[in-house]
Amino acid sequence: MSEAAGEKRRTGDRLAELGKRRGFFFPSFESYGGVAGLYTYGPNGAALKRHLEDAWRDRFTVKEGNFEIHAPTVTPKPVLDASGHTDAFDDMLIECGECGETHRADHLVEDATELEDAESVPPEEMAGLIEDHDIRCPECGASLVDRPVESFNLMFETAIGPGDSTPGFLRPETAQSIFVEFPRLAEYARSELPFGVTQIGPGYRNEISPRRGLVRVREFGMAELELFVDPARNEPPLSSVAAVQLRLYPIDAQAADGKSYRNVTVEEALERNIIQNQWVAYYVGLARQWYDRIGIDPDRLRFRQHQAGERAHYATDCWDAEVEIDGAWIEIAGLAHRGCYDLAKHDEHADDDYTVFRPYDEPVTVERATVAPDMGQLGPTFGEQAPAVVDALEELVSTEPEAFEGESVAVTVDDTELEIPVEHTGFSRETVRETGERIMPEVIEPSFGIDRTVYTILAHNLKQDVVDGEERTYLALPSELAPTFVAVFPLMDRDGLGERARSVAADLRAAGFEVAYDDSGNIGRRYRRQDEVGTPFCVTIDYDTLEDGTVTIRDRDTTAQERVAIDALPGTLRALGNGDRTLQG
């Protein structure tokens, strides 16, 4: 095993041990043997995840003025047929001929080579890489050379209703439930572009080989924003992010030596055409600012551009936010320009109209060709095909009105060419005054992985130092993410100290703080417990408290302490949490 791979495992073990012991996350259903890729968040993990989602909602929903929806996680099959997921939501699977274990072929190649994005390699080339590097089964050591590499659809299939039920799937992403409801959502936005819709919730992938804790799981949290824009008229507020510093890893840098980055501002990235779409650049800058806020190490963060073979078929450009954890780069977000692919697909397959009305600055007068088919003639002639004939005529007149200039016009219905007398089509040209046109918006999509971000925050903020001659492990979490904001301790639970401490804890909870109360063990051990779960501040009630009404506040990161009056405690804690004040002790 390589040194990097060994370090990855050590980090994973540290986080897994911390997750179990301190109630952040742990494998689900272990009493029944467990199921790979499914995790339960414990009390501290659930609070951390909730606070992270609140921070994302604050930045990408509230401050951006977007809508938020909550849609079902079960999706009917026709929706995913239209979106292309039933045909193209695949990973590459390889099965060991000896032990029968299945593995993701791209993961095996990444572990055995320096490739970071083997997912984009075609299956036929993947088999060649397995042969070139003599890759073997991680379980039994048997050679995987000449084993077939096959596509495996990752969606969980289900049935909606009993009997001849409607087929469905657990949603693989939250985006489609936004796209499919676009006509109604556009009404709420009064059809004024741009407007954005966000959603936070679970998605599901039937992973071939879940691994690395929360990094690759079968049920995972997502926070997605779908921004609908008119590219001819809408521009982002770039001035707010123009000076944000980025570390970009564009396609040309990846091809050159795989090590060079472009360290530029958002403004410079656009000027140099490194990022071509203004909206994508805006959200890359916004994401960079947000990652600072939630405690991701900026020196271990980059934005990598998708290569052509890796990019989704609908995306015109896509950048992944990636973080480094012990030498490995992990995708935690994707920021894509999806064009109008999704709306066009649902417009084609669904009954609703997926366009919006764009008014002209001034009304215009135009000549328009129209048809008004004579169903008294077409009905008897074409029978059940008559409605399809009408549809074909209406489509033809909108694209080729000159086709109606002869005595008959040809349309194709059910692969059969039919000749229709023009006099039966009701063809005419008329001059009309138009005040606007219908357009299909383009979509900009920032999509964030919640669980991977939780994992990254834990990995990037798990620190060690020495306090009073003893090694200390602590989580340097931002105050707004910490599972508990303040812990309250009595110096000891006697002489009225416990009662006073419990009263202080209750008052702080009533003031809106998330509070832990702990009177078990010596005060140093209690500090260490709270440091390890990331509690920013501890308040100690001692004998001086009974005399003068003051308490000691301790800062997690600096271990500095200061005495303040109990009456001033809520305001002091708020100022400390907001960064408006530091402890002077």
Image (cartoon, grey):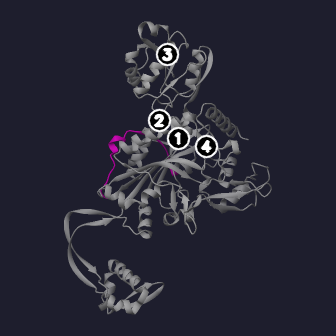
Q: Residue at x 40, y 57 (%)?
A: 443
- Going from the N terminus, do you reach mark 1 or mark 4 first? 4
Q: Secondary structure at mark 2?
A: loop
**Where's the N terminus, which quadrant?**
top right
Badge 3: how crowded within 10 Å, few (<14), some, or many (20+)?
some
- Marks 1 and 2, Cα distance to the nearest angstrom? 9 Å
User: Considering only vertical position in the picture, is 397 above or below 231?
Assistant: below
- Going from the N terminus, do you reach mark 3 or mark 1 first? 1
Percent x, y for residue 486? Answer: 48, 24
Foreground label between 3 and 1 = 3
- Marks 3 and 1, Cα distance to the nearest angstrom? 39 Å
Quarter of the image holding residue 189?
Answer: bottom left
Residue holding disc 3: 499
Report the side of 556 relative to 267 (left or right): right
Question: At label 2, which amino acid type do we have?
Answer: Ile
- Marks 1 and 4, Cα distance to the nearest angstrom? 15 Å
Residue holding disc 4: 39
Q: Is residue 240 magenta?
A: yes
Residue holding disc 2: 294
User: Considering only vertical position in the picture, is 199 above or below 472?
Assistant: below
- Marks 4 and 3, Cα distance to the nearest angstrom? 38 Å
Question: At label 3, which amino acid type do we have?
Answer: Glu
Percent x, y for residue 563? Answer: 44, 12
Q: Secondary structure at mark 3?
A: helix
- Marks 4 and 2, Cα distance to the nearest angstrom? 22 Å
Quarter of the image holding residue 577?
Answer: top left
Question: At label 1, which amino acid type do we have?
Answer: Thr
Percent x, y for residue 300? Answer: 54, 37
- Going from the N terminus, do you reach mark 1 or mark 2 first? 2
CB under 8 Å between discs 1 and 2: yes
* The magenta segment: 231-251
Residue holding disc 1: 453
